[in-house]
Amino acid sequence: SRVLLTGGTGFIAAHVLDVLLERGHSVVTTVRSAQKGQTILDNHPKLPNDMLDFVIVEDIAQPGAFDKAVVSKPPFEFVIHTASPFHFNVTDTQKDLLDPAIIGTTGILKSIKQHAPSVKRVVITSSFASIINPSKGNNPGYEYSEKDWNPITAEEAVENPLAGYRASKTFAEQASWDFVEKEKPNFTIATMCPPMVLGPIVHYLQSLDSLNTSNQRIAAIMTGKAKEEIPATGTFIWTDVRDLALAHVKAAELPEAASKRFFVTAGYFSNEEIADIVRDNYPELKDKVPAKGTKGGGYPEEGIYKYDNSKVKEVLGIQFRSLKESIVDTVKSLQAVGG
Ligand code: NDP
């Protein structure tokens, strides 16, 4: 099938792109500049001509940003919308986080409805941020699943950048379900709600300085920044980027994924465990990795919420990679860019 993938320069999207191509789909990806698009093309040199192309969408927060991008020959069957800001480097929560997330999501759905009647399924990258109830803390004993919604309010959204990010994901996902209910488009949606996403970077897109947010903890552990104290883990559940990419593609391909949320979680992790894995598998990094027993980065004594990932396994057939495999591969990929 022909697929539109937004934000092809992103950590997660780069893997979604490769899974799509491996499974025989032809892909057009949106990027913010021709240079970024060309880099993606240059790094896929062996493809037949019509398998991969890019289209420029400079700012997803602009109304009508996707009007042209959703039109293609042959027409699109699936859209995978991953583009959304994920960083805490914000001066204006509305402009930097909320607008691109919310207007970006409702905007692409409007453009598809108006200009791309061939689209059957839209997969949207949401987040555990839209599931968790942050006011409950580690919520020992409680089991999170697709039934849960983050109750965050517009007032709380502007309190700090973390709240702003979580609100951006919650409001954007809510807006997508509202859109489908009110507008009754020809397509169905599926939303992906991963917690912390770890895993190898695609070498041509990132450097250690511009590393995506969720992998920064691994870079800190391998480059000596966590030597004295391991940073707090924060979110104690994770998933590997390659498993998440496959989940996105299956959520587009499978009819039974229609109208479902997916809590794409592999299991528990802590930053202390990441340090243990790096230390055990990369003896050459032993002077930089925090020594066994360094303070910080462990699980909370009170315990931690449970998670139900059964829907992802049953409907999408995902088998999750282990934390060890993920971290070993991530470190290798970071070493390739100078880490
Ligand atoms: P990245 O920062 O690597 O990717 C973000 C992508 O969005 C980039 O392609 C970026 O383009 C694009 N983008 C951001 N703002 C705009 C804008 N205003 N206009 C156009 N494009 C924009 O992050 P991830 O790959 O980690 O995140 C991808 C998605 O996954 C996001 O929706 C995020 O919320 C979600 N997610 C990520 C998790 C994680 O742990 N990584 C966990 C849960 C959800 P450019 O590169 O040009 O800036």
Image (cartoon, rainbow, N blue to C red):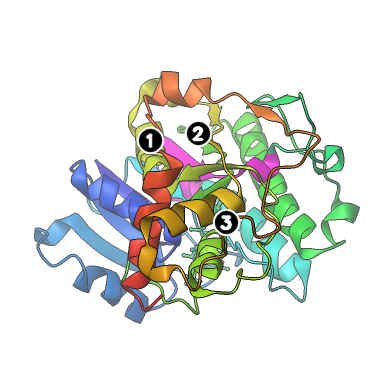
Q: Secondary structure at mark 1?
A: helix
Question: Looking at numbered disc 2 in the image, what kind of residue is underneath it?
Answer: Ala
Question: Looking at numbered disc 1 in the image, what kind of residue is underneath it?
Answer: Ala
Which one is in front, 227 or 237? 227
Q: CA distance from mark 1 to mark 2?
A: 8 Å
Q: Decide whether residue 121 is among the magenta residues.
A: yes
Residue underneath mark 2: 190
Q: Where, quadrant-wise, is the C terminus in this rendering? A: bottom left
Give how far across and how far down residue 120 sits, in percent.
39, 34
- The residue sitting at 39% across, 58% down in the picture is 330
Residue underneath mark 1: 252
Residue underneath mark 3: 292
Q: Where, quadrant-wise, is the N terminus in this rendering? A: top left
- The residue sitting at 15% across, 58% down in the picture is 50
Give how far across and how far down residue 284 sits, in percent.
36, 69
Judge the density around disc 3: few (<14), some (14-19), many (≥20) Cα neighbours within 10 Å. Answer: few
Q: Is residue 51 in sight in this rendering?
A: yes
Residue at the outermost right position:
155
Judge the density around disc 1: few (<14), some (14-19), many (≥20) Cα neighbours within 10 Å. Answer: many
- The residue sitting at 45% across, 33% down in the picture is 187
Q: Earlier in the sequence, mark 1 or mark 3?
A: 1
Question: Looking at numbered disc 3 in the image, what kind of residue is underneath it?
Answer: Lys
Above or below 91: residue 331: above
**Disc 1 and disc 2 in contact, CB within 8 angstroms:** yes
Magenta segment, which residues?
112-130
- State left or right for residue 19 relative to residue 320: left
Q: Secondary structure at mark 3?
A: loop
